Image (cartoon, rainbow, N blue to C red):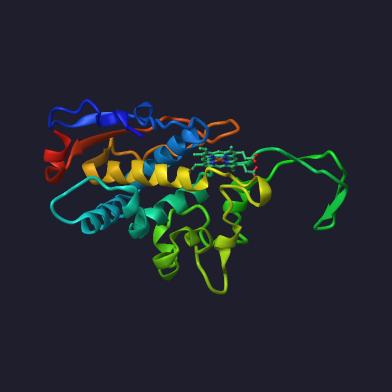
């Protein structure tokens, strides 16, 4: 895996990043563009919520310690706040908002609706993830609302932990589908997003290009790209200068 945005870094002045700089390369093509979309949405959310960005940076610094080194896959289970940011991003902007089309193999009845054999079925994950009857403040980015305890031992369990307890609204969290055709690249995808986003947060300070918030309008398509690609300023953090030069 390699990230182009700073692969040719040689100076210390501030630069502008475009969404096209987020380029996750791996030997497996499938799922990499959805992962890159997720990184772009997450960074956009963080630029609009600088407090969350600062908190994630602090968490990474504390986890890595001194001397500084780049984060690794083995660090991800310890980076709980970063993980919550990724989960909240996948809730608000699920990279495949209608999952993939499925076909009913037999006649069946679901919640009183008759579904004939051979019907194409789409699951509107985007709508489920923002259903006000399920989620508290569904349109808000609230990474801290994930319950910490669940993340300590089994970090993947955070898939079901936005407001545990009476509400258990996270049970409706479904960005990877479910059942036999659930995404087989889930672990790889979340690790790629974690490493890419975590490295960007660790190495650079980020700022919006102007005073306006980053435009969060969704583009059209089977996946969910940003309508207006992200642009942001970034500069290397003093503490990472040696590693980046
Ligand atoms: C954040 C990253 C990713 C997200 C959000 C995601 C999401 C999804 C979703 C929603 C489905 C359809 C599930 C369904 O229809 O019920 C799917 C299927 C699939 N994904 Fe992913 N994916 C990601 C990354 C990856 C990666 C990295 C790979 C491979 C390296 C991958 C490989 C596949 C394959 C092969 C299927 C088809 C499975 C089947 O039909 O049996 N995905 N993914």
Q: Is residue 181 above or below residue 27?
A: below
Is residue 226 toward the left or the right of residue 61 in the image?
right
- Quarter containing the C terminus: top left
Q: Is residue 217 above or below residue 187?
A: above
Q: Quadrant of the N terminus?
A: top left
The residue closer to the viewer here, 184 or 232, is 184
Residue 125 in picture, x, y percent from top left: 62, 47
- The image shows residue 19 at horizontal and vertical percentages of 37, 30
Residue sticking out furthest to the bottom: 166
Q: Is residue 226 above or below residue 72?
A: above
At x 60%, y 61%, the residue is 134
* Quadrant assignment, res 80: bottom left
Image-based side of 206 in relation to 40, left or right: left
Left or right: where 105 falls relative to 140: right
Query: Residue at the spot x=46%, y=38% of the render?
Result: 35
Camera-side residue of 33 and 50: 33
Q: Position of residue 120 (x, y in %)?
A: 77, 38
Q: Quadrant of ligand 1?
A: top right
95 or 211, which lies in front?
Answer: 95
Q: Residue at x 51, y 44 (%)?
A: 93
Count of marks, rendered view? 0
- Identity of the residue drawn at 22% across and 59% down: 62
> Residue 187's spot in the image, x, y percent?
48, 48
């Amino acid at each position: 895996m390699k990230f182009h945005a700073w692969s040719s870094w040689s100076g210390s002045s501030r630069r502008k990043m475009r969404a096209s700089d987020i380029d996750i390369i791996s030997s497996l093509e499938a799922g990499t563009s959805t992962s890159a979309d997720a990184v772009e949405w997450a960074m956009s959310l963080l630029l609009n919520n600088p407090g969350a960005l600062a908190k994630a940076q602090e968490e990474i610094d504390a986890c890595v310690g001194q001397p500084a080194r780049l984060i690794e896959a083995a660090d991800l289970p310890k980076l709980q706040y970063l993980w919550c940011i990724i989960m909240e991003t996948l809730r608000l902007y699920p990279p495949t908002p209608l999952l993939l089309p499925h076909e009913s193999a037999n006649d069946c009845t679901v919640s009183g609706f008759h579904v004939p054999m051979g019907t194409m079925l789409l699951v509107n994950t985007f709508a489920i993830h923002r259903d006000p009857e399920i989620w508290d403040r569904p349109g808000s980015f609230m990474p801290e609302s994930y319950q910490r305890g669940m993340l300590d031992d089994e970090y993947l369990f955070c898939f079901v932990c936005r407001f545990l307890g009476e509400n258990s609204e996270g049970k409706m969290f479904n960005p990877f589908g479910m059942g036999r055709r659930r995404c087989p690249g889930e672990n790889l995808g979340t690790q790629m997003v974690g490493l890419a986003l975590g490295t960007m947060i660790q190495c650079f300070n980020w700022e919006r290009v102007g005073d306006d918030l980053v435009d969060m309008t969704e583009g059209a398509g089977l996946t969910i790209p940003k309508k207006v690609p992200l642009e942001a300023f970034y500069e290397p953090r003093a503490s990472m200068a040696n590693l980046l030069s």
